Image: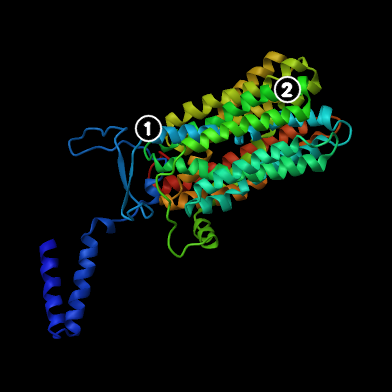
Amino acid sequence: MAKFIAHGKQYIEYLTNSSSLNSSHHRVLTFLLMLEKFMTPAARPMMTSNDSLHDHEKDVDADGADTIVNAPVTVKSENPPSNEEVTYPEGGYQAWMTVFGIWLIQFATFGYTNAYGVFNDYYVRVYMEGKFSSSTVSWIGSTQLWLVMSSGIVSGRLYDMGYFFHLIIGGSILFVFCLFMLSLAQPGQFYQVFLAQGIGAGLGIGMIYVPGIAVVSQYFYKRRTLAMATVASGSGVGAALQSIMLNKLFERLGFQTTLRISAAFNAGILCIGIFISKMRFAPIPPKNSNLLRSMRIFFREPEYIAVVAGTFFNLMALFFPTFFLQLNANQKGIMTENLSFYLLPVLNAATVIGRIVFPLMVPVLGIFNVVIPCVIICAILIFCELAVASASGSFILAVLYGVFYGAYVGMFAPMVGSLAKTDSEIGARMGICFAFNSFGGLIGTPIAGALLTSSYKWWRPTLFAGLSALLGAACLIASRFWISRYKGSQKV
């Protein structure tokens, strides 16, 4: 067939040179060009949503033997360096160095966001005691979380345009600068803390979060969920260690000196992470594509809408224990203050287990089939917080919640990325989803703080957070239904 097309084109070229080409010859030439395009490998269909990024099913060769999972995987895509195909190394020195580099960046940045419960407890009981309510203080952490997530709509788009290093370097500088500015905030001055920690640090982390997660996808296809979850575990380890460090230093050195030490420590971690991370190639966004056009395309998909809604309610609910668990223990007098300092580090350390173990189940069960039970269990554990009346019960709850909460956080980004039809959509889909669900993080903990009131009626915010988590799980179940019907498979 290829020789037939070549001879036909040579004959048409001869007629063109001899000025004998007529309309019939034009039609023949058009047919030959279309036939040649169809026969070319680059013209084969693009990866569809049926081949979603979380589908790690084993490839089987002609002899029925399983392919080696470490072997490079070649996938057709519209954004490779050669505009024809991408080969995923599925490991190797630079791939794992990049994973470790982004892990360190997550340790320093999003780990700091997850450690906000230490600040919330300190502000309410010490630094702003009697001046601002728990609900007001919660706006600092919720605004930071909102900016971390919502900035993804811009940073994800810039990442797709190849500005990876610009984003992580610029975001790191802004984050460290704002920590030093936070150290200058005076006791009881809410606006100073809000500007430095809520807005400035939130913007800095937001510039880093989506590009850091997305760049890992350039090295992995079959192992993508595991690689992304491994990276996300950095925030769990960071939150655990930084919670202990902040609690101990607040007690010994005071607020301002502690923040300067913390800023210098995180600056060093970020420098190492940036130095060893590397982009394989600059993603090329689809031609004639813009943010509004991408949104119109994505929001025509009911499964994407349901995921955005589900993650909105989950973000509104699941940060409640991380913000209020330490305050709850101290206010109820369940344990000594020194012992309560370890609740958040234990919770955050347990998230590492969930972030690593549960993604291993994804190739067998499917990512939605793993995420949805984790969210439901988190909702149940939130309700169980009302029944806890001892130190041992608090730590058991912290461990269990940390495991399942960590599983959700670790698979949250890969779950959104699994809806992308091509690699060039990953940054945009994550960014748009994060921008919308970030409003859940913005209003969730302040609402919980307002429901708590100065009388500390814990059943109100607990009921609010638990029901919100269940509503988020229901949305994810709806998304799973649409995806499974489209794929014709229950492995979703």
Q: Are marks 1 and 2 in contact (CB under 8 Å)?
A: no
Please tell me whether mark 1 sits on a helix, a strand or a loop.
Answer: helix
Q: Is residue 266 visible from the viewing direction of this image? A: yes
Residue 454 at x, y percent in the picture: 86, 32
Which sits in the foreground, 422 or 455?
422
Question: Which residue is farthest right?
Answer: 130
In the figure, residue 238 lies in which quadrant? top right
Left or right of 426 on screen, residue 364: left
Q: Residues within 10 Å of mark 2 (few under 14, many from 20)?
A: some
Instruction: Give amino acid for label 2.
Output: Leu
Which quadrant is home to the N terminus? Answer: bottom left
Q: Is residue 409 visible?
A: no
Q: Residue at x 59, y 43 (%)?
A: 311
Label 1: which residue? 93
Q: How many marks?
A: 2
Image position, residue 159 (x, y; %):
50, 50
Q: Secondary structure at mark 2?
A: helix
Determine whether, in the image, residue 219 is placed left or right of residue 124.
Answer: left
- Figure quadrant of the C terminus: top left
The answer to whether residue 157 is above or below residue 124 is below
Q: Nearer the viewer, residue 77 or 314?
A: 77
Q: Give the residue at mark 2.
A: 249
Query: What is the spatial separation of the Cα atoms under label 1 and label 2, in whole angstroms?
Result: 37 Å
Q: What residue lies at 23% left-to-right and 59% top-to-bottom?
A: 40
- The structure residue drawn at horizontal position 20% and vertical position 80%, both measured from the top left corner, is 26
Tell me the tag on residue 43: none
Q: Position of residue 329 (x, y in %)?
A: 75, 21
| Drawn side of residue 166 relative to residue 86, left or right | right
